[in-house]
Image: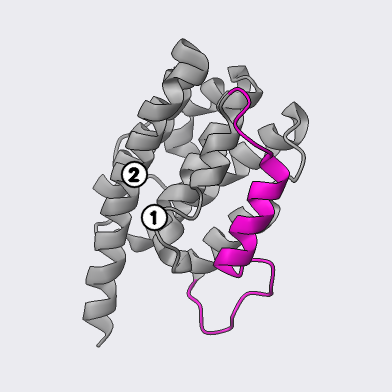
Amino acid sequence: MSLVELIAQADERGLAASGLACLDRCVPLLGGDDEVLRPLWASLTDGGGDWGESLEKARVALDAAGPDEPAEDEAARLARRMLGAAPADRTAAGIREWADACSVASLQIHRLLDPAEDGAGSVDVPREGRTEGISPLVAAELRRQVTVLELLAGHGAGGLRRALEVSTEGRRVLRAVVSRRARGRV
């Protein structure tokens, strides 16, 4: 099943986890620590806290409420927009739109950061299930997005821990890419 189909079929918790996982993997671009989004993850569990309050705290911690900095590169601007666009109310309609936008933005971020040539043309191609010619970093991000949605579809709240582990793995990869890239600029 394609990523687009998985997003279309996901419930509210799955969509929130999907968008949050995309954002979580991009935290290295925002200068945040690995725990900054943990309260948002906790809010997805039954009785785990308030999504809106946790979101506002994350925005403050990542200073995402302010305007984009002119010196930021496109990847960081996309990550800031992901956080800025997160709906304060975790309703199905708002979360679905946000999760879809996060999916696109995260794939675009990975495409921008991957030094390998990406022959897919656009990020819509792999999201629709055609993966020929996509770069390794984009392919790995696509697999993570699919895995998160499948975990939540198959296990509900029980899939959250594994979804967080998948996201943590992706964050480590992106942190290494960002670090390598920064060293190359010096």
Q: Is residue 113 left or right of residue 27?
A: left
The type of residue carrying mark 1 is Asp
The tag on residue 168 is 2
**Which image quadrant: the C terminus?**
bottom left
Residue 117 lies, with reference to residue 48, above or below; the image says: below
**Residue 66: x percent and y percent?**
69, 73
Residue 66 sits inside the magenta stretch: yes
Residue ID for mark 1:
34
**Residue 152: x percent and y percent?**
48, 20
Highlighted range, magenta: 46-73
Q: Is residue 28 left or right of residue 87?
A: left
Foreground tag (2 vs 1): 1
Q: Quadrant of residue 141?
A: top left
Residue found at the far top of this picture: 154
Q: Secondary structure at mark 2?
A: helix
> For the residues marked 2 and 1, what is the alpha-carbon distance in whole angstroms?
8 Å
Q: Image point 42% across, 36% down: which residue?
A: 126
Determine contact: label 2, label 1, CB under 8 Å: yes
**Residue 83: x percent and y percent?**
61, 55
